[in-house]
């Protein structure tokens, strides 16, 4: 438990060397921004992965020669499955029209595709709680029907997204190691310089009988505050950038992926601040070991 005397001495030392500490906090903010940005990307990728892990949708593409009776019979059979909530028939013309509503400007070669390039399909809405094994069994049976050309459940896309998330987590872990080293180096250098500038004060304290712990505590507290402020500054800067980017984000893109962009969860932000404070205290303590005898 830190005493009021320790807090006062730490505050007085930071006010006296405010330029040095401000430079250190700014450097730490830039460092934590890199880690926070990586965590922000991973957070949103994980949200998209969870959203599409059970997308609740399957597209049954019909063969070109499939009759309307075959389509109606298949639609009625699908509606009798308890886990299927709705089945919508999408003709080739309807598919071409929906594509035209979302076509990208400048893609004239795509706009020139004939109606025959868009197969008719049955868009099946399934309950989110439907087990993957049951969905896979239904897809296997549908593919065996003569009128069905193919069935798409978007599972392969989900698996690729899951691999992307795992790669992002691994990259974030590697970046975290780099951030740890940078934080330790910046705060250790700052504390060594601050101790050198206050060498006379430390020597006077030692002469009047102050213990090493009494001398060290304000510096450790200063290092902890620096680390925490650096993380807080990074979170604030990321929040501003996130709001700016989110305001310019195309709403159609958000509708396409099915989720809205999200900021860092509170526990991740709190963890960054706690990590900054802990690393700051460790760096200050490590730098003092060489200059203040324990």
Image: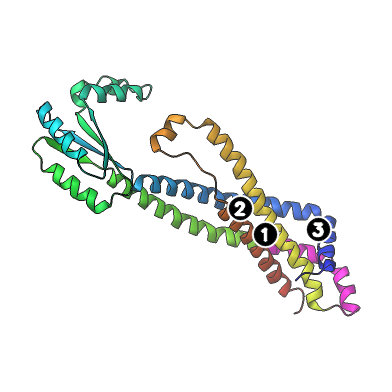
Residue at image coords 24%, 45%: 82
Observer-nearest of 184 and 257 = 257
Evaluate whether residue 73 shows in this view: yes
Observer-nearest of 36 and 255 = 255
Q: Kindly state the secondary structure of the residue where label 2 is placed.
A: helix
Q: Kindly state the secondary structure of the residue where label 1 is placed.
A: helix
Q: Bin the neighbour count of mark 1 within 10 Å (Cα to Cα): few under 14, some 14-19, many 20 and up.
A: many
Instruction: Measure the alpha-carbon separation of dots 2 and 1.
Output: 10 Å
Question: Residue 119 appears at what percent x and percent y?
Answer: 19, 29
Residue occupied by mark 2: 31
Q: Determine contact: label 3, label 1, CB under 8 Å.
A: no
Q: Which badge, 3 or 2, is on the more N-terminal residue?
A: 3
Q: Which mark is residue 14?
A: 3
Quadrant in which residue 190 is drawn:
bottom right
Residue at image coords 49%, 40%: 261
Query: Image height check: is 280 above or below 263?
Result: below
Classify the position of the C terminus by image quarter.
bottom right
Residue at image coords 21%, 27%: 118
138 with respect to 31 (left or right) = left
Q: Which residues are magenta?
A: 186-210
Question: Residue 54 appears at what percent x and percent y?
Answer: 33, 47
């Amino acid at each position: 438990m830190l005493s009021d005397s320790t807090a006062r001495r730490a505050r007085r030392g930071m006010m006296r060397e405010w330029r040095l500490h401000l430079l250190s906090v700014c450097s730490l903010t830039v460092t934590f921004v890199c880690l926070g940005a990586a965590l922000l990307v991973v957070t949103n990728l994980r949200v998209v992965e969870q959203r599409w892990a059970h997308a609740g949708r399957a597209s049954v593409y019909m063969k070109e020669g499939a009759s309307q009776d075959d389509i109606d019979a298949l639609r009625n059979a699908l509606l009798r499955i308890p886990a299927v909530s709705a089945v919508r028939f999408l003709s080739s013309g309807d598919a071409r029209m929906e594509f035209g509503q979302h076509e990208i400007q400048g893609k004239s070669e795509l706009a020139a595709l004939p109606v025959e390039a868009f197969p008719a399909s049955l868009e099946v809405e399934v309950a989110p709680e439907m087990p993957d094994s049951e969905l896979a069994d239904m897809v296997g049976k549908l593919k065996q029907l003569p009128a069905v050309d193919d069935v798409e459940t978007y599972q392969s896309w989900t698996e690729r997204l899951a691999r992307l998330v795992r790669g992002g987590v691994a990259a974030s872990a590697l970046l975290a190691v780099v951030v740890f080293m940078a934080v330790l180096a910046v705060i250790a250098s700052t504390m060594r310089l601050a101790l050198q500038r206050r060498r006379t004060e430390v020597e006077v304290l030692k002469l009047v009988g102050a213990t090493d712990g009494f001398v060290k505590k304000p510096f450790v507290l200063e290092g902890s505050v620096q680390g925490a402020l650096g993380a807080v500054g990074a979170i604030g800067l990321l929040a501003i950038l996130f709001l700016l980017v989110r305001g310019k984000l195309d709403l159609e893109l958000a509708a396409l992926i099915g989720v809205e962009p999200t900021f860092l969860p509170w526990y991740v932000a709190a963890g960054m601040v706690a990590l900054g404070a802990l690393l700051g205290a460790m760096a200050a303590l490590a730098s003092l070991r060489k200059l203040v005898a324990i």
